[in-house]
Image: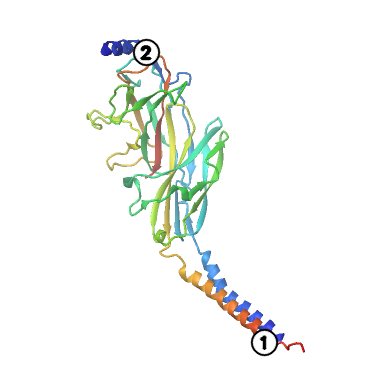
Amino acid sequence: MIRCIKLAGFIAVLLVIFLPSYTLAREFKFSVSPAEVHIDDLSPGETSEFELTIHNKEELTHNFTLTTFQPPEEQRRVGRDEFPDDSWISFSSAEIEVAANSEAAVNVTLTIPREPKWAGKEWETWLGVAAESSDLLGVKLYVRLLVSTKAAIGVGSNAGLVAGIVVGIVLLGYGVYYYFRRKPKPE
Amino acid sequence: MKTVITSIVISIILALMLSLPALAQESGTITITMTGVNEISISLDKTQWLPGEVAADTEYITSPPIEWCTLTVEGNCNVNTFILGEDAEWVDNPGAYKWTLSNDGTNGENVYGLQFRISGDTTRGPLGDGYVPITKIESEFWPYSGGSSLAPGDTKQFGLKLLTPNYFVGSRQMQTQITISAATA
């Protein structure tokens, strides 16, 4: 009985409309530059910024979305590890409208947390730029972002800062103490 | 009084002497290389396919079958290209009904298959006929198996094959998207 119902349903639904039929086939062109960004000697705790330029080569205004993407190991450059956390990367605008035959820039900010475990690393991640479209075929362009961090966090620099402040406070304190000790007491 | 002032001045000078180099070190050099003026771009000469009304458990192939769309490398750098599919959703109410994209080009109940074939490629794919399943995991479009990447000006022609679910709810307009992506080689 169930098979009969299923067969009846099957016959009833033979025809559907697959994919919208109102849009004509058309070519679509845009570009992104630079295609590859290398950031070297970034210390954990530091921030770096760069610009991506999206060039809309169409006669119509288009919206573009920016995302991060973790490429599979076989697509990464040799010796590069997976980028640990996409939240370290932010875009000035994750969605941008670019006028016809124009270009627009998006600022990308990269911040590595100040933790010793992120020192001496070589990572790769991809930044994807896609044109919003309801067509069957869409295009996405990836920018390779290769990041290397310094071998060690500047421990010595912190020690110098702390030592300077401590010495300053001690000397200041001694000066104040000396002043009050030498000050003649009122009779 | 003179001693106090001297003490304070000396202490400030010492504190600055020790801390300024340390602060200067905090803003060390970061090298950002943009690799010249590399520009990445690919184009497709068609972005839409109109099968219209379709029947269950039936294959639909673009026309011409393997030279339907041309991908052209437009930028000034060599690229590797990838392809990604997704579930087809009911246009009127995307969250309410969908066809799940299979991971091997086959079909099932409310499960559909998508495949592509590149012109000149007759051996690729699970059946060795050149047709490769399009899945929800981004996979190699060209090159594959460590072949040569595409250089600026290179083109690749390809076609698509749709296998409809063997059972689905009828009279519903379905929509999906196939994303072709590129990264520098």
| Element at label 2 | loop
User: Residue A15 — which label?
Assistant: 2
Q: Position of residue A115 (x, y in %)?
A: 44, 60
Picture coordinates of residue B134, whole percent (x, y) = 33, 31
Query: Residue A79 at what x, y percent from top left?
Result: 33, 54
* Residues packed near mark 2 inside 10 Å, few (<14), some (14 to 19) or many (20 plus): some
* Disc nearest the viewer among 1 and 2: 1
Instruction: Give, as a three-letter code, the residue at label 1.
Output: Arg
Label 1, label 2: how far apart the Cα atoms are = 101 Å
Q: Classify the position of the N terminus of chain A by image quarter.
A: top left
Q: Secondary structure at mark 1?
A: helix
Position of A140 with respect to B5 (left or right) is: left
Which is nearer the eye, A185 or B16?
Answer: A185
Q: Chain of mark 1?
A: A
Chain letter for mark 2: A
Q: Earlier in the sequence, mark 1 or mark 2?
A: 2
Q: Quadrant of residue A152?
A: bottom left
The residue at 44%/47% (across/down) is A86
In the image: residue B2, left or right of residue A104: right
**In this orientation, which residue lies closer to the viewer: B108 or A33?**
B108
Residue A45 can be seen, yes or no: yes
- Where is residue B78? Give x, y as percent: 38, 43
Mark 1 sits on what residue? A181
**Quadrant, the C terminus of chain A:** bottom right
- On screen, residue A176 versus residue B175, left or right, reads right
* Amino acid of disc 2: Leu
